Amino acid sequence: MKKVLDILTFGLYNTRINKQTLGRKNMADSVNYTAEMVSSMTDQYEAEPTMATVEALASQFSKPKRSIISKLSNLGIYVPASKGKTKAGAPVVRKDELVEQIQDALGTHLSLPSLGKATKSDLLTLLAIVETNAEDAAAN
């Protein structure tokens, strides 16, 4: 008897939930950007891919900058701004890029994943040593 009541009440509960949500809109049903807006955004951003263009698009369509950037990213055309420079004025270089440069300078095509666990200063020192040794070897 309990199973029958559970089945009946579960069905009633689901019916009540469905009636409550029947008149509501799903977020997937609403359109945030029309095809014309997307076309205009694409044309303007591809002509000049800068943050100034993103800001102009945000004011033109009354949307937040993050929304415009997100849409451009989803379209696959957003170009992120460069990382800038360090406090010392040198360009920002990621550790994995340093590891690739070291591997290239050594002339090895082996993968050295644990090398990326070294500190950045150690990687810079190792890169300088490897590059100087490569130059010395080329000179001889």
Image (spheres, helix red, strand yellow):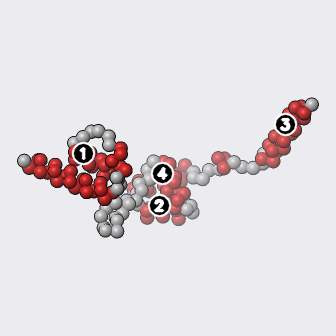
- Which residue carries the number 2 mark? 54
Q: Secondary structure at mark 4?
A: helix
Front tag of 1 and 3 = 1
The image quarter containing residue 113 is top left
Q: Which residue is mark 1?
A: 104
Residue drawn where x is 62% and y is 50% of the image: 31
Give left or right: position of 58 versus 125.
right
The span from disc 1 to disc 3 (Cα, nearest Å) is: 66 Å
Can residue 6 be seen here? yes
Q: What residue sits right under mark 4 in the picture? A: 73
- The spot of residue 102 in percent (x, y) is 26, 48
| Residue located at (7% from left, 47% from top) | 140
Q: Tag 3 or tag 2, which sits nearer the N-term?
A: 3
Depth check: 8 or 3 in front? 3
- Between the residue at mark 4 and the residue at mark 3, the CA separation in whole angstroms equals 43 Å
The reply, left or right, for residue 57 in relation to residue 28 is: left
**Which of the numbered marks, if any, corresponds to residue 11?**
3
Disc 3 marks a residue whose amino acid type is Gly
Q: State the CA–CA distance, disc 2 to disc 3.
A: 50 Å
Asked if marks 4 and 2 touch (Cβ < 8 Å), the reply is no
Are circles 1 and 2 on residues that touch, CB within 8 Å? no
Residue 25 falls left or right of residue 100: right
The one nearer the camera, 134 or 50, is: 134
